[in-house]
Image: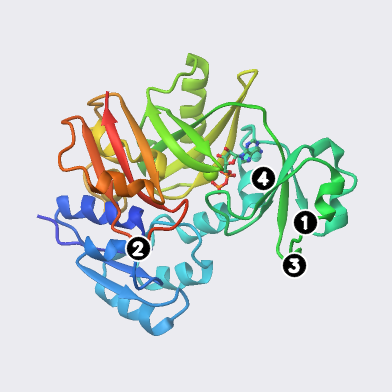
């Protein structure tokens, strides 16, 4: 019997699924989130709400838990660092600081001799003038972006001047890759050279938001192996503990690029709940809590569809799903356009 209480920062669907996985392992969860309506409150043992710099609430949270993890990366470094002085935070705060900044993240990946898109730091509007080489491109905020938020396609250097952007924040300009496909690798690192790694997952985005994921990914053997090797190299170099996701681009000439790293469980890995003996969520909890590592076994091929905004309504009204269909309703209070409301995984 384990007697561990795991603290989770963040209360969205990833927090819910982590709490569900923890429960299965007899681990209690306390979720700390700045949103009073956060859906993960329905799945954890205790829910504490407060802003991510509220010292009193954070200390109440720390007092309840044995160790801390997080379900999203945009948490102030200072918060994680302060918590880490009292209770172990996994993945380490320094890992989160590196990955939450697009420039630092890409510099780190390039230093490992892993290909990324071409990119350049942009600090002011005029920086873009001499950069025809990077166009067409996408201008992205260096921090706090997700689901395509804070991103602007730039086709010509003139285009930037008509945009109303606050350049007091840092930006990065990335050359647009002529995409053939996108894939992701989910890997859970337990300790030095000990991993569980899932096969590559093929992802389709619409309006920069993930819409479909499936296994097996339709890719050649080279890309299959290279994406796994690169994910292992990244996890090892970071001395990462827990589940991590690496998002990749494949261009029309079958070149592989790392797009970005997520220091957490990931939307493209939802199908692991039904398609493998151990999900990405359970593996994360096992790794951060120091539990036994169990070899991964694939149960089935699968595809997952994200249900955005009003799309959830149709599924909420279905009385009985087929045996190979698994519907998850995130129980979010409000339906908003393009908001991730739930997903459905089909084993195929
Ligand atoms: P987010 O943090 O919002 O997930 P990403 O950098 O992963 O940001 O971008 C979201 C999606 O936008 C990508 O999955 C891809 O479909 C598209 N995209 C982003 N950057 C590029 C690029 N340089 N070339 C081609 N497509 C891109
Ligand atoms: Mg992304």
Residue 17 appears left or right of 221: left
The answer to whether residue 293 is seen in the rendering is no
The mark nearer the N terminus, 3 or 1, is: 1
The mark nearer the N terminus, 4 or 2, is: 2
Q: CA distance from mark 2 to mark 3?
A: 30 Å
Residue appearing at x 79%, y 38% in the figure: 134
Residue 320 appears left or right of 258: left
The mark nearer the N terminus, 2 or 3, is: 2
**Label 3 within 8 A of ligand 1 by Cβ:** no
Q: CA distance from mark 4 to mark 3?
A: 22 Å
Disc nearest the viewer among 4 and 3: 3
Disc nearest the viewer among 4 and 2: 2
Residue 166, picture quadrant:
bottom right
Residue appearing at x 65%, y 55% in the figure: 142
Please say if the residues under marks 4 and 1 sit with CB atoms less than 8 Å apart: no
Q: Which residue is mark 2?
A: 11
Q: Which mark is residue 107?
A: 4
Q: Which residue is mark 3?
A: 168
**Quadrant, the C terminus:** top left
């Amino acid at each position: 019997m384990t007697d561990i209480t795991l603290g989770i920062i963040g209360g969205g669907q990833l927090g819910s699924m982590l709490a569900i996985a923890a429960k299965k392992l007899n681990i209690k969860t306390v979720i700390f989130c700045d949103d009073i309506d956060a859906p993960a409150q329905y799945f954890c043992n205790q829910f504490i709400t407060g802003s991510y710099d509220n010292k009193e609430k954070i200390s109440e949270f720390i007092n309840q838990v044995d160790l801390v993890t997080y379900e999203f990366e945009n948490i102030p470094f200072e918060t994680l660092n302060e918590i880490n002085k009292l209770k172990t935070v996994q993945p380490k705060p320094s890992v989160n600081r590196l990955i939450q900044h697009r420039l630092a993240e890409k510099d780190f990946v390039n230093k490992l001799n892993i290909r990324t898109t071409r990119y350049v730091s942009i600090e002011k509007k005029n920086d873009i003038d001499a950069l025809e080489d990077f166009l067409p491109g996408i201008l992205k905020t260096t921090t706090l972006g997700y689901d395509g938020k804070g991103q602007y396609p730039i086709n010509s250097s003139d285009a930037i001047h008509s945009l109303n952007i606050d350049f007091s924040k840092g930006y990065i300009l990335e050359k647009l890759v002529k995409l053939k496909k996108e894939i992701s690798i989910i890997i859970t690192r337990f300790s030095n050279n000990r991993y569980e790694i899932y096969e590559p997952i093929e992802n389709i985005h619409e309006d920069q938001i993930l819409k479909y994921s499936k296994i097996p990914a339709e890719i050649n053997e080279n890309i299959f192996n290279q994406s796994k090797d690169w994910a292992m190299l990244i996890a090892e170099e970071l001395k990462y503990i827990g589940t991590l996701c690496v998002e990749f681009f494949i261009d029309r000439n079958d070149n592989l690029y790392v797009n970005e790293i997520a220091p957490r469980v990931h939307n493209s890995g939802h199908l692991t709940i039904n398609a493998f003996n151990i999900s990405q969520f359970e593996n994360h909890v096992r790794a951060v809590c120091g539990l036994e590592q169990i070899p991964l076994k694939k149960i089935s091929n699968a595809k997952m569809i994200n249900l955005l905004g009003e799309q959830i309504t149709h599924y909420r009204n279905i009385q009985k799903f087929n045996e190979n269909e698994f519907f998850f309703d995130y129980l979010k209070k409000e339906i908003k356009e393009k908001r991730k409301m739930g997903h459905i995984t089909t084993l195929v």
